[in-house]
Structure formats: structure tokens, C-alpha cells
Image (tube, rainbow, N blue to C red):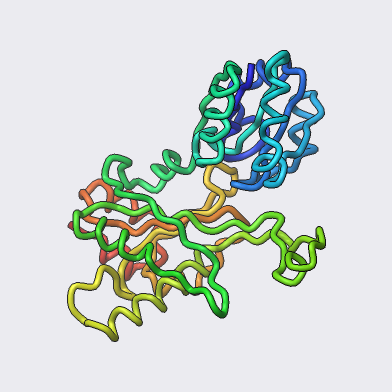
Amino acid sequence: MFYLVGLGLGDAQDITVKGLEVVQKAKRVYLEAYTSVLTVGQDALEKYYGRDIILADRDMVEQNSDELIAEAETEDIAFLVVGDPLGATTHTDLILRAVEKGVQYRIIHNASIMNAIGCCGLQLYNYGEAVSIVFWTETWRPDSFYDKIAANRERGLHTLCLLDIKMKEQSLENLMRGRKIYEPPRFMTVQQAAEQLLEIVEKKNKQSKENNALSPDSVCVGLARVGGEDQSIVAATLRQLATVDMGGPLHSLIIPGNMHPLEMDMLRLFALDDTVKASLTS
């Protein structure tokens, strides 16, 4: 059996009872380590689970997935995923490969950022399409995601912005030379995402000052380390969030749409200052 086990958001103890039972009985346990990260390291997981864990990086999952699945033809294999197992298309691909080879699979669900964002008080059923904000470079500055934010805002819906994670990335030079030398992990912060959004807003304003989805004074919500004991939530203007240090990863950003009075009441709990708090009135 090929088990895809969700680990939840925070630390080793966030695994479900059902998931822990699978981990403890499996022949081998793999940890997917590139679509997201836990707030604790691999050692903490091994200590809590009482099992050795094999780190499954991008190369292993994307290039050697057939070998991974082949093991599950005769043994129970546990594949651990931060959050919920189906939060990334990579894991859907694994399921399809397993079915193609006649290997049975089972999904053990858990909390993910897609539902845990309810902690800020914005109701889950009021969200539109989620977007991803990636790190810009000097020559690559994509902004097409902004159109999705605008479409959500036009419909009065909130937008969850998933912020970029760079794990085991190679520089262009090392990639071209075939050198297995990797850059340090990078995690986009709310501050960086807000800075990039402000640039896009400025560009849109130069093109047309009418019907823009956002302004520097739009109230947004920054979240950090959701599910952890040091979870942080800040409601502030986009301009303010570009100056707020929310600490270590992982971060997320929410662009609110139309808000119910109860939603505004909740956001006032996290307002950066009295001006933001006063703007959150029905």
C-alpha cells in the first residue's frame, strides 16, 4: 500500500492518530521536502515517530517516483507531506502513477494553509481563487497573478496569496555546468510580497487610475507560522505590510474582498494600529 500522510502545519505532534499508526507500521517512511516545510526538523520527527525517515527531495520525487511506487507493490510505504497530501499537484501525479501500476493507495488528510487561514477571521467560503507570488529576479518579474486578485475583488471575494519557497535550487552557472551545488533555502516573507505588490499597483496606476483592484492603502492580512505556538497575524495596509517584520517562515498574505461585520470584528483584533482598526468598520 502507498500511503500519503498529511503532517499538518506546525510540529511533529500535528500528525493525526491514523497517520501516526501508518508511519509506525510502514516498511519505509519518506518525507517530501520541497513543496513546504515544517517548523521542526527531520530529527524531531524521527524522535517523535520512533522511525528513521528518508528525505525525498524534488529530484527523487519527480525523477525516481516509479521506484518509490514500485516499493509499495509488496510493502507498506508512507510518504509524508507537510499540510495535506493533496495540496500540490506533484502528489496527485504520484497517485495517478500508482493507479497506472496497479498499486493501492490511501490518503491520510490533515490541516493545510488552505483551511487554517480561517484563524484570521475571514470566512473560508468567501475566498476566490488562490494565487502564488514568486520571487522576482532582475530579468523576470511576473505579475499575471494580479489579474486573479482583481477578478476576486470584483466578485467581493478574498484572495489567499501563497508565497514562494525555494528549496534545493541551483544557480544558473551551476545548472549549466552540471554541478550539484545548491543555493540556501529561501522563503518569501509578507514584507517581500507586499513590496512586489506595491510595484505592480504603482505600474497599474500609471496605466490607469480607475478601477484598480488595490491601492497602497488597501487593508490586507499577513500571517506567519500558522498553526505554531508563535503564530502571528497582522491586519494592515499594503504599504504598512511592506515594512512589517513578521519573523521566520512560513508566511502567507490575504487580500480581503467584501467583508461581513463579523469578519471586520475579527480583523480588528489583529490591526497594526488604530487607523487600521478604525477603517475596519461596517
Q: Is residue 167 above or below residue 15?
A: below
Residue sitting nearer the eye, 220 or 149: 149
Residue 72 figure quarter: top right
Please give the name of the residue rendered at 72% of the width and 63% of the height, measured from the top-left corner: 170
Q: Is residue 123 above or below residue 80?
A: below
Left or right side of 72 for 260: left
Q: Is residue 25 above or below residue 38?
A: above
Residue 131 figure quarter: bottom left
Residue sitting nearer the eye, 7 or 138: 138
Quadrant of the image for the N terminus? top right
Which x, y percent locates residue 162? 47, 54
Please give the name of the residue rendered at 66% of the width and 29% of the height, measured from the top-left corner: 79
Please give the name of the residue rendered at 21% of the width and 82% of the height, measured from the top-left corner: 209
Q: Is residue 89 visible?
A: yes
Residue sitting nearer the eye, 7 or 277: 7
Q: Residue lying at the far front in this picture: please name it.
A: 100
Q: Is residue 84 visible?
A: no
Residue 25 figure quarter: top right
Quadrant of the image for the C terminus? bottom left
Which x, y percent locates residue 274? 34, 67
Which x, y percent locates residue 60? 72, 41
Q: Residue lying at the far bottom in this picture: please name it.
A: 206
Residue sitting nearer the eye, 205 or 45: 205
Left or right side of 11 for 89: left
Q: Is residue 178 above or below residue 47?
A: below
Which x, y percent locates residue 36? 60, 46
